[in-house]
Amino acid sequence: MFEYAGIGGFILLVLDVWAIVSILSSSSSTGNKVLWTLLVILLPLVGFIIWLIAGPRSARAGA
């Protein structure tokens, strides 16, 4: 398992929390929300990057 420490780990944590909040506020189905959230939690850096490129957008993004 990777160990994240210092300011880089903190920044990654903040970005992952932001991604999870955005996923949960999106208009996607519940199944998609669960899968995206698990991806971000289990693979913090890679999951965040994949979500940033291809993940569901929040409901506020279209407004």
Image (spheres, helix red, strand yellow):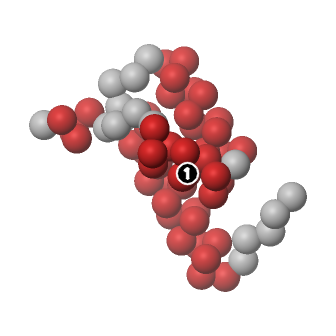
- Mark 1 falls on what kind of element? helix
2 is higher (above) or lower (below) than 20:
below
Judge left or right: residue 58 versus residue 23: left
Q: Which image quadrant is residue 25 in?
A: top left
Residue positioned 35% across, 31% down in the render: 26
Q: Mark 1 points at which residue?
A: 48
41 is higher (above) or lower (below) than 3:
above
Residue positioned 45% across, 37% down in the render: 55
Judge left or right: residue 57 versus residue 40: left
User: What is the x, y in percent for residue 39?
Assistant: 64, 39
User: What is the x, y in percent for residue 24?
Assistant: 43, 34
The quadrant the N terminus occupies is bottom right
Residue positioned 55% across, 51% down in the render: 48
**Residue most toward the front?**
53
Residue positioned 65% across, 36% down in the render: 38
Classed neighbour count for the residue bearing mark 1: other residues with Cα under 10 Å, few (<14), some (14–19), many (≥20): many
Q: Nearer the viewer, residue 14 or 48?
A: 48
User: What is the x, y in percent for residue 19?
Assistant: 46, 48
User: What is the x, y in percent for residue 21?
Assistant: 43, 44
The quadrant the C terminus occupies is top left
Amino acid type at image mark 1: Phe
**Residue most toward the right?**
1
